[in-house]
Amino acid sequence: MQLGEILVNDSNLTLDEMRLLRALDQKRTLSALAEHFHRDKSVLSRKLKSLSEKSSTIEKVGPQWRLTELGKRLSRLSVDFDEAQKKILGQPTKLRIAGSRLFLSFFLAKRLGVLRELFPDREFLFLTQEGSPETSLLHGTADLAFACGRPQDPAIGFRRGLHEPYCAVMTPQFYQTNGRPDSQGVAHLPHFGLIDADESLPFLKHLSTETPIVGCSNDPVVVLQSVRHGNAWSILPYYCVQEEVEEERLLALPLPSAEVPIYGVWWLKSRAGTGKAAARIFDWFSKQHLDEAGE
């Protein structure tokens, strides 16, 4: 008997019902479930109704089906069982790491070789997202996350590690053309901003309320392209422009009186395997520097 079958036998659920349970935990709506399984919504609706009558794992709240606390626990446990089964069968398991596109692209991806040394039996799945990774961790779509600040849900464990230095970035030509401004003076020049999850410009408040905003985007590549072509300046983490600064293709000025975010590692406390993985990756991460080039 396979490990997954032991779990579903104990809970009187079939493997298909466990898959439906996990999908509901991740997809949340009937339309998303139908798209995920490539099935008609009416078919899935009947399956959900049958599952609710058979077990106390789901319930209907208004027009939506929701997992109960038991359902959530079973859904998350099934992820651990799947990973354990793959290990028994000698199959590599994925380590799903969530983080911002900036951090994953310009910091973590450059250090994939080090991650492979830390976890030689894992494949890596980098999941880019903006805003808090709590939902991904709670729904089991990510195993670990790199994020700033502190989680709101007490089910999320975290350890804060490194300061994330930001700087004002522009081309040398933009700098020369606009009279070689200092960090205060650049605040009065055209700015293309990187917006966060709530569409605000978090660091601009440290410079000037009169800064002319010529554009903004939640995609760092769009922001970088605008800066690279000399159209504006922007505020970005130093690690994502370091190589271009060292090659003198871009110029970086320090930000005056800016609060520096602290990056850390987040994980779901109830996931048995992720606590050890989080401790191992944090031990490595805490020794790094976000203002140094990758290996």
Image (cartoon, rainbow, N blue to C red):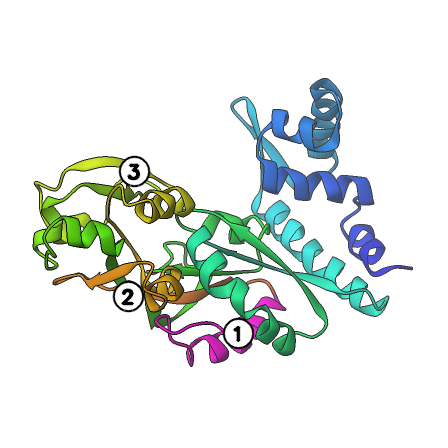
Q: In this view, does 50 lie above or below 16?
A: above
- Near-viewer residue (245 or 66): 245
Instruction: Please give the range of residues in magenta.
Output: 272-295
Give the x, y percent position of residue 97.
Answer: 55, 59
| Structural distance between the alpha carbons of marks 3 and 2 | 20 Å
Give the x, y percent position of residue 152.
Answer: 36, 54
Residue 292 falls inside the magenta stretch = yes
- Near-viewer residue (173 or 11): 173
Residue type pointed to by label 1: Ile
Q: Is residue 286 above or below residue 34?
A: below
The quadrant in which the N terminus is found is bottom right
**In which quarter of the view is residue 79 placed?**
bottom right
- Near-viewer residue (209 or 49): 209
Residue displayed at 66% across by 40% down = 23
Residue displayed at 60% across by 33% down = 59
Residue to which mark 1 is pinned: 281
Give the x, y percent position of residue 224.
Answer: 36, 48
Q: In the image as oriented, which residue stretches furthest toward the right?
A: 1
Q: Are marks 3 and 1 in contact (CB under 8 Å)?
A: no
Left or right, 61 with reference to 40: left
**In which quarter of the view is residue 258 placed?**
bottom left
Q: Which mark is residue 22?
A: none
Residue type pointed to by label 3: Cys
Residue type pointed to by label 2: Pro
Dot 1: element? helix
Q: Residues within 10 Å of mark 3 (few under 14, many from 20)?
A: some
Residue to which mark 2 is pinned: 165
Disc with the residue nearer the chain's start (3 vs 2): 2
| Structural distance between the alpha carbons of marks 1 and 2 | 21 Å
Dot 2: element? loop
Q: Do the residues labelled 3 and 2 touch (CB within 8 Å)?
A: no
